[in-house]
Structure formats: structure tokens, C-alpha cells
Image (tube, helix red, strand yellow):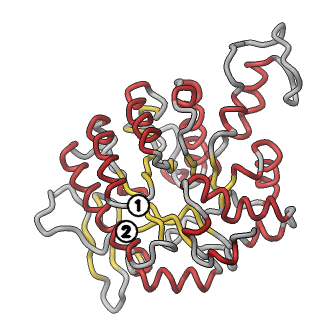
Amino acid sequence: MIIDAHAHLLPHDYPEDAPACFPHMEPIEGSTDRLLVFDQMRFPAKEVFWQAERRLEAMDASGVDAEVVSPMPPLLRYDLPAADGLALSRHVNDVAAELSSHAPDRIIALGMVPMQDPDAATAELAAIKEQGLAGVEIASNILGSSIGDEKFLPFFQELERLDLPLFVHAMPSPSDRLPFSAMGTYVVGIEGMYAAASLILGGTAAACPNLKISFSHAAGGFAMMLPRANYFWGGSWNEEPRDLGRAVMPDDGPSPLEYARRFYYDSMVFDRRTIQYLVDLLGADRLLVGSDFPAMLREEPAAKTLKSMDLPDDQWQDIAWRNAMRWLGREAADLPLAEAVATA
């Protein structure tokens, strides 16, 4: 059993009366693909982004039993006027719900909200749950503001109250510190790290201990920084007992590592050595399978690198599907092949 907890969807089209700032899809001659046009973006999108039958065929071909599909990250455009951002979110959410309805046990859809208006985003969460969507995706920063900023705390508290899982996808912030060519590489690592760290440092993790949250690409460089953060908190190396005489910023709360072990992380980090570090530091019970499909090609078969690591069976089962179910708050009976996994 494999659940791909990081896959994406795109609408086939947008309403004819949509605001001019909406994206639109243009036909590509001689192809079932369509061209996503969104300001300067031109992205050729394959039919599998929106066509349920193609999606299921692709899953079967890769050995994936279920996908958690979230809006393609460029749709998370927080620079739109708030009303237009809400309208775009509702259209994408309708598309996500319709896609999932074709095979709700295999296509598990997340929605989106207009985070440029935290109050509107918070109010929209109840509608997302009522619509049957599994949770919500947001970007790693909101127009340059960390998601751990106190202005977003009511949003996270409402997520926790409604028991809705959250997926945080790394996205660039308004900055010219790195060239555009780094947007898909180094920026992913930096932004993921900022997002996860901000939830700890800003107090959200303490205020929302039952928040179910996952980060794309293992929250980038976050795991590499955690031992240093733990030293500043407790004054010891290698997570040994605290030495407050050495601690730089001691406090009485949980350690940074304890907070980090409440989060989930998809393991799409492209290297078995990095995955092993994540297992050793954070635990196999924190990791998920992820692919970015169809924006990126999956390994064939899915999770090939994970399978090559010869992990103990309990760790493999956790990463392959059980952690995704815990993050989503679902039971094994909700899955395809439920009988096969009932005793796993």
C-alpha cells in the first residue's frame, strides 16, 4: 500500500466571467494538454492534472494506491485582491471536490483559501470541511510574512478545532537574494525551513498542539538546523540531557526537536542518505511518500528510493501509508484495498 501525500491538480478551465486577474487555460493544438497562463507564467499541463480516469491510470501504472492532491502551487496567489482570491479559491475547491468524487478513496483532495485575508481564510475552513475536502494547502509564506506570524494564529486554531489537516508547500517570497534560476531548488529548501521554524518560534506550535500539519520536501533545510536549535535551547550536543549552564536561550517548554516531531514531512528529498537522516532525527513515524506528480515525474515505480533502503517493515509501512492516514485523520477502512491493509 502506497499513499502519495504530495501530488497536484489544476482546473481544466475557469469561468468565462472570472475577473481578469484569474488564470486561464489555452488549448494546445494537436494535444489534450492545455497551457496554464497566469501573468508571466506559461505552463503546459497534462490532462492527468484534471481528468480522474487518467489520474487513476497513472496511479496504477506507478503502483500508487491513493493520492493526496492539492492545488498546483502557482494558484496560491496571495497578491490578488482578497475578493478575487476567495473567488479563485472557491472555483479551485469545486474542481478539487469534483475530481475526488470520481474515486474518493483514491483521490483525496485538499482545498485552498485566500491567506491574504486571514479572516476570510479562517471563515472559509468550515465550508471546505462541509464540501468534503480532506484539508487545506497554503504556501510557506504569505506575501513575505512568515506563517508563524501571530496574525495567522486564529487560522491555525480554527484548523485545529475543525480537525482539518494542513499541507504547507514551499513557495518563493518577495526577495531578490537568489536568482530566478534557484526558485525550484535552493528556494524550496530555504522557504520550507522558514515556514516550519516560524511555527515553533512564533508560538503556533505551542498554541495548537493537536494541529495536523505536513511540509513539502521535508521542510527543506529545517532538519539540518534542528540540532543547533536544540543546543541553544538545552545546552547539550546529540540530544543528551540539558545543560542549562551552556544553553543560550533556555526555556521551560518542549525542545525544538519535540515540536518538530509533531509535524509530518514528505520524503521527496531525492537521496536515500537524506531520508535516513530524517528517519534517525525525526522518526519514521513522521515521514510520508511524496512525488509532486504530475508537475514532476514520479520515480518508477513510486517510492523506488524508499524501497531500496531495506527499512524495517514497520518503518516502511509507516512511511508508505500509515503516517498519511494519521495526518489525514482517516481509518484504514477508508482506503482502497482496505482488507489487505487491515492487519498491516
- Horizontally, residue 112 falls left or right of residue 241, namely left
**Quadrant into which the N terminus falls:** bottom right
Taking the view exactly as shown, the residue that stands out farthest to the top is 245
- Horizontally, residue 303 falls left or right of residue 8, namely right
* Residue at the (44%, 79%) spot, across then down: 48
Q: Is residue 180 above or below residue 311?
A: above
Estimate the x, y position of residue 244 in percent, counting from the top left. 81, 10
Give the Cα distance between marks 2 and 1.
6 Å
Residue 99 location, quadrant: bottom left
Q: Is residue 157 above or below residue 32?
A: above
Res. 176 in view: yes
Which residue is under mark 1?
71
Estimate the x, y position of residue 214 in percent, counting from the top left. 57, 49
Under circle 2, the secondary element is: loop
Res. 268 in view: no
* Residue at the (43%, 38%) spot, across then down: 161
Estimate the x, y position of residue 332 in percent, counting from the top left. 62, 66
Amino acid identity at mark 1: Pro
> CB of mark 2 within 8 Å of CB of mark 1?
yes
Name which of mark 2 and mark 1 comes first in the sequence: 2
Amino acid identity at mark 2: Leu
* Most foreground residue, 66 or 341: 341
Which residue is under mark 2?
10
* Residue at the (61%, 54%) spot, across then down: 326
Under circle 1, the secondary element is: strand
* Residue at the (46%, 35%) spot, across then down: 147
Estimate the x, y position of residue 213 in percent, counting from the top left. 55, 45
